[in-house]
Image: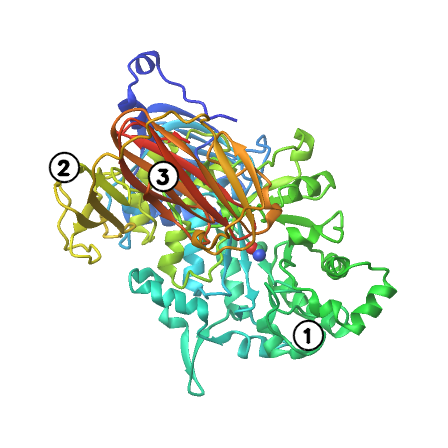
Amino acid sequence: MRRVFVLTLSLALGMGLRTAHAQEKRYPIIPYPQQLVPIEGAFTITGATRLVLPANGRLFANEVAQLQALVKQGIGTTLKTATAAAGNAIVLKQDMTLSGEEDYTLQVTPQQLLIGAKSPTGFFRAIVTLRQLMPSAIEGRTTGNLRSVAIPAMRLKDNPVYSWRGMHLDVSRHFFSVSYLKKFIDLLALYKMNKLHLHLTDDQGWRIEIKKYPLLTSVGAWRELNNQDSVCMEKAKENPDMEIDQEHIIQKDGKTLYGGFYTQAQMKDIIAYAAARHVEIIPEIDMPGHMMAAIRAYPFLTCDGKSGWGKDFSTPICPCNESTFRFAEDVYSEIAALFPSKYMHLGADEVEKTSWAASPVCAEVMKANNLKSVEELQSYFVKRMEKFFHAKGKVLIGWDEILEGGISPTAILMYWRAWVPDAPVKAARHGNKVIMTPGNPLYFDAQPDRNSLGNVYHFEPVPKGLTAREARSIMGAQANIWTEYIPSEKRADYMFMPRMTALAEVLWTHKQDYDNYLQRLNEQYARLDQLGVHYRLPDLDGFTEDNVFVDKGMLEVKAPFTGMTIRYTTDGTIPGLKSPVLPAALPVTAPQTFKLAAFSPMGNRGDIYTLRYRQEAYAKAVTEKPADSGFRLDYFKGAFKTTAKIKATPDSTFRTDKVIIPEGLGHGEAFGARLQGYFYAPETGIYSFYLTCDDGGMLYIGDKTVVNNDGWHAPLQKSGQIALEKGWHPLKVDFVEGGGGYTLKLEYSVKGQPLQKL
Ligand code: ACM
């Protein structure tokens, strides 16, 4: 459903950009409500405002307390209650005509603020909307800074499109404190996200107390620093956010160990905290793979008592021994008792099955159960566990590998493998419920770049090919944060904020306007600053990474929102709050390297940009027009970690009219590709090229390297410039894919014109 803007005629006639943005400033709500009718004026909360509670006020006691806490943050006192609305009053009214538990209405006039909802959840969502309309000062550490709090008048009706609006956090690879989880939950609640999926166990650490198996945490929660920590420590030299949080490092028996876990008492507290904010926590104990931490503590869990790494993944637990099922059921019994959610996530992704194939016990189990492959053996494990989940009154969720070897009709599929596009379609047609978490764009552990916010915003939860009826199986979507390379709270904040706000709007409101969202997002930053969120600042524009000038260049960078400053250095050091502020236009007349960073009003630093400037003459065009304006695409089978390693002879060759890798090439396997053709420069000038790759790529024009985006990585954009004479220029793109899903996009612009796709 689209949001409705009702404007008076004079407003509509005179509505330039400025007026339009005034609306977004006045109602900067994310996710935007389904219907909002602006009204002139505002309702003002002061100490004299009265609060009128619904008849069965006790049902809403938690929400009333939160509203009171919010008011107190602003004006320093809570509101006195009254039985009838007389004078300035906030009225809470239970409205049984609303259909959904999360639905709510607001009618705000200068005289009265009326909140309607059917359930406590609806009231909570309404209070969050009001919170976003209050000045950001109410979020500060000190209370009572304001004499009054004004809420702009309006008529609003709101409800979510999707019921699963989730975030996942991997607390195994790196561990996050109880206080951080609460901060995380606060942010989910602030943007009306309602599910928190905790990935509690993995090879690198077991993070939840299980009373029957104490070694899971006394042994399994601690590890020596690993190769992922080494990568973080190396990156920390350039980026302090990559420093490992010291509070999770201990000394034990002469060793430095990393880890931690939540006791069941701590987890109960976290669950209650989330429930009060209408966020449901879904536990995942990932099995049968990703179980090294448990296996270290209890080696009997594998088929042969051994463990280690196979080709890609670690040795799984053995689905052929009854002792494994006893263990799994014991663990999940405690989990079922601890977490009130009706969902439990079994994981079941990325299982290395060679130890099963080699096991004589598994051979017997497979024969006895008529299982024809180790995939069917995995399915046997999942289905047995699902029966156990059902006995506990719980619904099983699994990663999309549970489709292989046969899925039960009652399991929920969590889709992640972008390179298996038909998995959610098959599952939905089979009648299974599906939660969408495709790696691109919903793995928030992928380094964000200037496109990632838009990519999330334009994500469509319903996969292609489903009928409207089948689409009802899509419960919603979720972003996942895998933390191998997220060793600190600051880094975690940076990775999911503000991306989560884009997802929140996709899932709650669904169809919206991106530019309008960006305007509202700009209004949210001051609030996030007050909340101490180390969010990623908006991207800076006006340069590429490798810049070219012929006679004289000009560095002109505009701050994306007011209060943000841009600082720079030329000596290779990282810009800090003491570095000089970049002037509006800085002439560049000699080769030079700049480092730039933006700073929020609270001093939160944005990405550090390294801009190299080099001087070059316009490259000459080829003298003859090429016979064909398309591209030759050479395909090379094999795993090439960088483009330089691509082998000499292609396995096949195609033609394409665009710089793309056709869908389905490689079928999920690693490969290399080379595109060769000509680029037409319509005028003489400096051309900026933007190469987005997953995994890696290089762009060459003539004999020059223009963009280096090499090596295996998630989708990432890199840019560079070249000075070109009008006419045709030889162009080459080398590309490497490490297996899984891929992306290749090449865009350019000249003289500040809009980007064009090649
Ligand atoms: C996953 O990313 N292995 C679910």
Camera-nearest residue between 365 and 332: 365
Residue 38, position as x, y percentages in the image: 37, 24
Task: State how far apart marks 2 and 3 are (Cα).
Answer: 22 Å
Camera-nearest residue between 418 and 517: 418
Of all residues shown, which one is farthest toward the front?
623
Disc 1 packing (10 Å; few <14; some 14–19; many ≥20): many
CB contact under 8 Å: marks 3 and 1: no
Camera-nearest residue between 451 and 190: 451
CB contact under 8 Å: marks 2 and 3: no
Tell me the mark number nearer the camera, choosing from 2 and 3.
Answer: 2
SS at circle 3: strand
State which quarter of the image contains the C terminus.
Answer: top left
Looking at the image, is mark 2 or mark 3 earlier in the sequence? 2
| Res 552 label | 2
Residue shown at 46%/66% (left/top)?
Answer: 175
Residue 656, position as x, y percentages in the image: 52, 32
Disc 2 packing (10 Å; few <14; some 14–19; many ≥20): few
Mark 3 belongs to which amino acid?
Tyr
| Res 711 label | none
Mark 2 belongs to which amino acid?
Lys
- Give the labeled residue for mark 3: 690
Residue 117, position as x, y percentages in the image: 52, 36
Indicate yes or no: mark 2 CB to ligand 1 under 8 Å: no
Looking at the image, is mark 1 or mark 2 earlier in the sequence? 1
Residue shown at 40%/19% (left/top)?
Answer: 6
Compared with residue 565, is residue 628 higher up or lower down, i.e. above or below? above
Q: Is residue 93 visible?
A: no
Residue shown at 56%/68% (left/top)?
Answer: 203
SS at circle 1: helix
Residue shown at 49%/65% (left/top)?
Answer: 173
Left of 30 or right of it: where is 298?
right
- Give the labeled residue for mark 1: 301
